[in-house]
Image: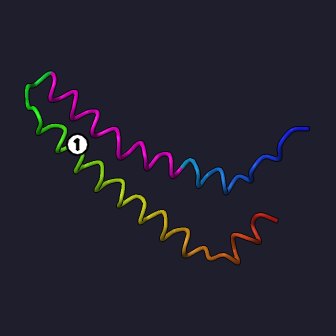
Amino acid sequence: MLPELPDRNEMGRYVALGQIGMEMVAPIVAGLVADHYLGWTPWGMIAGAVLGLVGGFVHLVHLLNKMDTKGPSQSNQESR
């Protein structure tokens, strides 16, 4: 038998969390590339890390506030 697939809302949350993770990692990689090609070592990576962490945390707080305003009663009704 095939395993039961998670509902769309749950998958959307997983995708949003994965996107936040990528938002935190991508600027660091871009900073490393800038360091390599422009010779800014280590300032590109430091700037990328700060940018990625701030942007990721802002997006995470926004997502958590959005999930909090829905409330548990509404999310249970949507999954039925």
**Up/down of 44 relative to 20, above or below:** above
**Left or right of residue 4: residue 16:** left
The residues colored magenta run 16-36
| Residue of label 1 | 48
Residue 21 on the magenta segment: yes
Which amino acid type corresponds to the residue marked 1 in the rendered image? Gly
**Left or right of residue 58: residue 39:** left
Q: Residues within 10 Å of mark 1 (few under 14, many from 20)?
A: many
Helix, strand, or loop for circle 1?
helix
* Most common SS among magenta residues: helix
Query: Which x, y percent locates residue 53?
Result: 30, 53
Query: Which x, y percent locates residue 15?
Result: 56, 47
**Up/down of 68 relative to 22, above or below:** below
Q: Residue at x 77, y 71 (%)?
A: 77
**Up/down of 74 relative to 8, above or below:** below
Can you tell which quarter of the image residue 42 is in? top left
- View extreme (right): residue: 1
- View extreme (top): residue: 37
Residue 27 on the magenta segment: yes
Query: Which x, y percent locates residue 23?
Result: 38, 45
Q: Count the labels in the image.
A: 1
How does the figure colour the protein chain or chains? Answer: rainbow
State the quadrant of the C terminus: bottom right
Q: Residue at x 22, y 42 (%)?
A: 48
Q: Residue at x 91, y 38 (%)?
A: 1
Q: Residue at x 21, y 35 (%)?
A: 31
Can you tell which quarter of the image residue 41 is in? top left
